[in-house]
Image: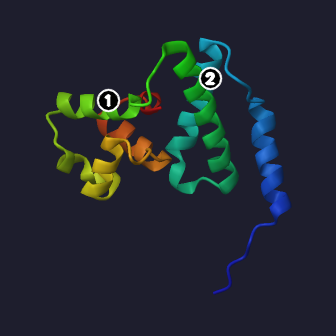
Amino acid sequence: MIETVADPMDKQAEYARLINDVLPSVIQSEEQNEAYIQRLAELLRREPSLTESEKRFAKLLTLLIEDFEENAYGLSKAGPQAAIRFLMDQHRMKQKDIAPIFGTASIVSEVLSGKRKLNYEQIRRLSTHFGVSPEIFF
């Protein structure tokens, strides 16, 4: 079976369209932050089927959201780990209980220790599993 490779110009055009739809910039307000979070959540809901351009765009939105929230709320880098630990505690769960979300128990340990960052799929799964907004993991 021969796999076709997308034309790099098509990828650039798709990414340019995504950028043009939102015109992302450094976030200056709660309203702008919320709009970016909503757009990111839309992408995360479709995560398994995202194109490379959409993944790239999601990373950009994530960086902008993280920057705003760190500056606006003084969130520490331990934010996602603390959120996971809090949710595990509230649901009376142990690391082994959330291993299916991450794939392996060792990945859970690496994420909770801060050695590994959450990826989009893990954020989507955590959000779905605990019934919370993906933004708490940024």
Q: Is residue 90 above or below residue 12?
A: above
Q: Is residue 106 above or below residue 30?
A: below
Q: Is residue 132 above or below residue 117?
A: above
Tell me where residue 31 appears, x and y as whole percent.
62, 14
Which residue corresponds to mark 2? 35
- Identify which residue, 59 or 116, lies in the foreground: 116
- Identify which residue, 94 or 39, lies in the foreground: 94
Residue at 32% across / 29% down in the picture? 82
Count of numbered tags: 2
Tell me where residue 56 appears, x and y as whole percent.
66, 48
Which residue corresponds to mark 1? 82
Residue 106 bears which disc, if any? none
- Horizontally, residue 67 falls left or right of residue 97, namely right
Tell me where residue 3 appears, x and y as whole percent.
68, 79
Q: How is the image coloured?
A: rainbow
N-term mark: 1 or 2: 2
Q: Quadrant of residue 85?
A: top left
The kind of residue on which mark 2 rests is Ala
Tell me where residue 32 appears, x and y as whole percent.
65, 18
Q: Residues within 10 Å of mark 2 (few under 14, many from 20)?
A: some
Tell me the element at label 1: helix
Instruction: Kindly indicate whether the residue at mark 2 contacts the one at mark 1 (C-beta within 8 angstroms).
Output: no
- Horizontally, residue 6 falls left or right of residue 69, namely right
- Horizontally, residue 10 falls left or right of residue 44, namely right
- For discs 1 and 2, the disc positioned in front in the rendered view: 1
Residue at 33% across / 29% down in the picture? 83
Quarter of the figure with the N terminus: bottom right
Residue at 44% across / 45% down in the picture? 117
The kind of residue on which mark 1 rests is Ala
